[in-house]
Image (tube, grey):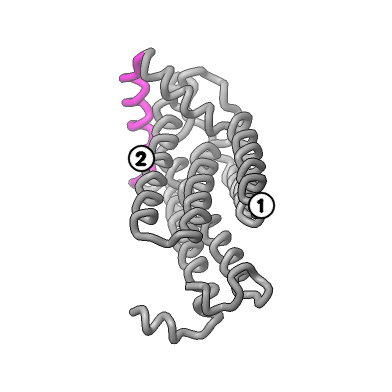
Amino acid sequence: MHRLWSSAPPWVRVWLPGLLAAAVGAFGFLQILDEVLEQDAFVRLDEPLIQWLADHRTDGVTAIMTFITNLFGTTVLPLVVAVGCGVWGWRTRRWREPLLLIGAMGVASGLALLAKVAVGRARPAADVQAVPGLETSFSFPSGHTTGAATLVLVTGYLLWRRRRTRRLLAGWALASALIITTVGFTRMYLGYHFLTDVLAGAFVGLFTLGLVICADRWLDSRPTADKGHISDAK
């Protein structure tokens, strides 16, 4: 397999990994979107799940879920990303990775906003929301989950690309799955999003990761790039 990959045309080795990730993200998102628009069987799980979670809330768990969800909200997360990227660039004297992350967060947020407006899906009923009326935007996809997925997937990739070890790859995959699942669960537990909203947000993050991989590997393929020639884009 490694020999086959090494013998592939340069443009394939540059674009294929990112395009595959973006394709999986786009396919997953479109499948969920179709479920939502057609009100298929999968969507019929949305309201019963939200209702069950609302019926089993406790004050202590709700407080924890609220804290976690606020970390990935539109107020805190952009500030964390901005400060983190600033420190990242200052400490490493490399601004490519921080700028790619900032760009990814902007693209993902824009895509989620466009989808919200285009689909126009209403939020879960007020009686299942932890704070009724707190969330007023459209529901599909989950912006919090989109932000969390984009942040952990893109950051993990940008760190892994500098030291491509299996251990780091496994840690990235595990941490990403844990954080995305946790943030998505908080949105459902608090009654602000359906399961399909959360899954769609995760796929938007995966799609954005694919775009970042394409951009990163294209930059590496240029003769003046940090790593030199296309042969280094493994």
Q: Reply above or below: 28 against 221.
A: above
Residue closest to the far top: 59
Circle on res. 93: 1
Label 2 is placed on what type of residue? Arg
Q: From the viewer's perspective, is 99 left or right of 14?
A: right
Circle on res. 19: none
Residue 28 screen position, x and y as percent: 43, 56
Residue 14 occupies quadrant = bottom right
Q: CA distance from mark 2 to mark 1?
A: 50 Å
- Mark 2 vs mark 1: which is more N-terminal? 2
Residue 197 screen position, x and y as percent: 47, 41
Q: Reply above or below: 230 against 200.
A: below
Residue 45 counted in the magenta span: yes
Q: From the viewer's perspective, is 220 left or right of 55?
A: right
Can I make out residue 140 in this image?
Answer: no
Residue 16 counted in the magenta span: no
Residue at image mark 2: 44
Q: Which residues are magenta?
A: 42-58
Residue 138 occupies quadrant = top right
Q: What residue do we see at 51% from left, 66% from top? A: 18
Dividing the image into 4 quarters, which one contains the N terminus?
bottom left
Label 1 is placed on what type of residue? Arg
Q: What residue do we see at 34% from left, 53% from top? A: 170
